[in-house]
Image (spheres, helix red, strand yellow):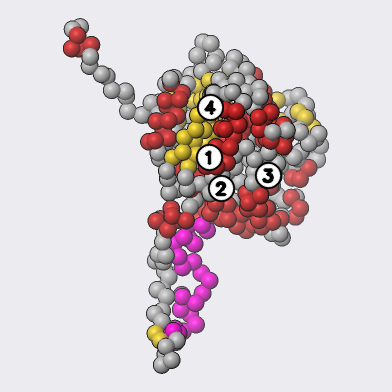
Amino acid sequence: MNDAEDDVLIAPPEPGEVGLVEAHDFVHSHPFAFESGQVLPGFTLRYETYGRLDAARDNTIVICHALSGDHHCAGIHALTDRKPGWWNNFIGPGKAVDTNRFFVLCANVLGGCQGSSGPLSIDPVTGRPFGLAFPFVTVRDMVRAQKLLCDHLGLSSLYAVVGGSMGGMQVLQWGIEYPAFVRRLIPLATTARESAQAIAFNEVGRQAIMQDPEWHHGDYAGSGGPHVGLAIARMMAHITYLSDQSMDQKFGRRKTAGAAAAPSRKPDVAGHAFPPAAPATSAAYTFDVQFEVESYLRHQGESFINRFDANSYLYITRALDHFDLAAAYGSLEQAFAAVEAETLCVAFTSDWLFPPAQNREFVLALLRTGKRASYAELTTSLGHDSFLLESEELYALVRGFLTR
């Protein structure tokens, strides 16, 4: 090969798909003590893996999911699936988290409802769902359970832990809890403590569920329960994941196809605006869906009740409320004192749930403690959910951090 041929750059292959995947169950058959002091005789974590574990068993990237996510973060379960895993744009051959190089692991959190032990699981003592008898769960409990899964898989270390929102909280907890086991941390759109505003939103959602007459203090059949309350909780929470600008761009004040346009207002002789007479049946004077944004939120609520358990929503939001690293360890600096991993934090300008200032706060604490940490702030209009959506800037940041 001559020098000219040596200089030719070979373009990397186009990003591919993980393809067909299947879930597995890790059954931990020993007592597990929660931070609350409550104990389960054992638990189950449902998980998926993509890519191959190398001979050293140290090329694993753990993906931590957010509140409404689960273990199915990439690929499809069947050719008839309408949608792939929730982070399929981010994980796969040649993608930001490259499964040609890394072994990727994602587990449904302890307390969840997609195969992992949670309130919906059957209590072996009563033969009925645990409901509110399930132990209270913290983010630290979630991470400790995931570490037991890693031990079960024989992993010697983790190349990285990646997650956004509640997933980012788990990322930080991984670095604190198992400093010698984790080499890189990538928390996205997250915080070191749940703010009063975020707790308030969570409480509104919980009250919507608990005030639903079908909640029955958490004792309901698997196919029943407070569907109306859970749908309202999801609708309200989903608003916090977006931004005013993104909602205005996507929906504006556009009406649904079946909604009549609002009647024009004509001034009377005194100059006051008033609507012309209209029949009582006019669509403009009902509480049926009239605006596209209303239809969108109702769809979000209705689809959520088909895949999520109301009690799990209560438990997981309460776990978020209690997440406060400074309070748990005395200060953020003390919390991060043992961290050995290098950290890349990415925040998004339009995120008002966990705004950039909350992300910068823990990065600065890491730096003050002498840790290797970097921070990037991406300008977006998409709100908190920016970390889930298509973003070449985010892909480039993560790919560079993982491969350098």
Query: Which labelled disc corresponds to residue 309?
Result: none
Percent coordinates x, y for residue 392 in the rendering? 38, 36
Quadrant in the rendering for residue 236? bottom right
Compare marks 4 and 1 and give the one earlier in the sequence: 1
Name of the residue lying farthest toward the bottom: 269
What element does badge 4 sit on? strand
In magenta segment, residue 295: yes
Look at discs 4 and 2 and give the one toward the viewer.
4
The amino acid pointed to by label 3 is: Asp
Mark 1 vs mark 2, CA separation in Å: 9 Å
The amino acid pointed to by label 1 is: Ala
Question: Is residue 5 toward the left or the right of residue 401 in the image?
Answer: left
What residue sits 19% from the left and 9% below the top?
A: 3
* Residue pointed to by mark 4: 373
Query: Which labelled disc corresponds to residue 353?
Result: 2
Magenta part of the protein: which range?
273-298
Query: Which labelled disc corresponds to residue 321?
Result: 3
Q: Tags 2 and 3 in contact by the CB under 8 Å rule?
A: no
Mark 4 vs mark 2, CA separation in Å: 23 Å
